[in-house]
Amino acid sequence: MFLVGLSGGIASGKSTVVAVLRELGCAVIDADVIAREVVQPHFKAYRQIVHYFGTEILLENGEINREALGNIIFSHPEKRQLLNSVTHPEIQKEMLKQIWKYFVLGYRYVILDIPLLFETNRLTKFMKYTVLVYCDPPTQLSRLMKRNRLSQAEAEARIASQLPLDEKRKLASHVIDNSGDRESTRRQVLKLHARLEDSLDFLWARLVVGTVVAGLGGLVYLLLRRFIS
């Protein structure tokens, strides 16, 4: 099995691509969903966040007020780093659990949907391939203004807070151009899926694990024979 990193930019249409991949039966791990899960009250990260940021960030039901926390870290980069140091290890642990699950189930590859894959650049070394969902800047701006009901200045500020799509495009091994209509995007996703399915890169992991398991099995057998005799 091998890993495929999927990313995009705000309003570039990554959710559209993910929906098609799920239709095709692909294993997709959504880092955003996991990030929301690990800050629920029964998780370790929740307790640490409340310890560092105080109970002022909690809603009446005890859950974290994401908007209030977001306002704090948006204007204080050092607090954003603190939050990341708390949540990222927990997110990565949960991602590893899900990757292992799909490996055991026999999937050839797993897609990791990570919004800041290219910004952080820590996880790209674990990816066999990286995929960027791209759209041209005017389309991105227009979509964001319409979707979030923002002024042009507000939308431009949000886009500017991320690494430009044209820069990410240089870093990706595959690009899906979502500037056009949905059918055009779907055709590109189908083509990518076929290419990944035909890849034999998943075999090396199976061979490595098979060799390790066989070696451990042989060792256990020899030890049992020694104790029995």
Image (spheres, helix red, strand yellow):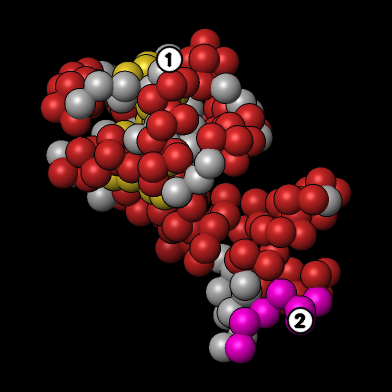
Residue 77 makes an appearance in the image: yes
Up-down: is 71 above or below 39? above
Up-down: is 121 above or below 111? above
Instruction: Tell me which segment is drawn in magenta.
Output: 54-60
Residue under the image location 20 percent in, 38 percent down: 20
Please name whichever residue, 138 or 127, is drawn nearer the observer in this view of the structure: 138
Residue 173 is tagged as 1
Q: Amino acid at mark 2?
A: Thr
Q: Amino acid at mark 1?
A: Ser
Please name whichever residue, 50 or 152, is drawn nearer the observer in this view of the structure: 152
> How many numbered marks, from 0 up?
2
Query: Is residue 23 shown in magenta?
Result: no
Please name whichever residue, 119 or 164, is drawn nearer the observer in this view of the structure: 164
Q: Which residue corresponds to mark 2?
A: 55
Disc 1 to disc 2, C-alpha distance: 43 Å
Residue 21: give x, y in percent of width and height. Answer: 23, 38
**Looking at the rendering, which quadrant does residue 142 occupy?**
top left
Tell which residue pokes out farthest to the top in this image.
Answer: 170
Residue under the image location 15 percent in, 39 percent down: 24
Q: Secondary structure at mark 2?
A: helix
Give whichever of discs 1 and 2 has the lower sequence position: 2
Q: Secondary structure at mark 1?
A: loop
Residue 42 is tagged as none
Residue 39: give x, y in percent of width and height. Answer: 59, 68
| Picture quarter with the N terminus | top left
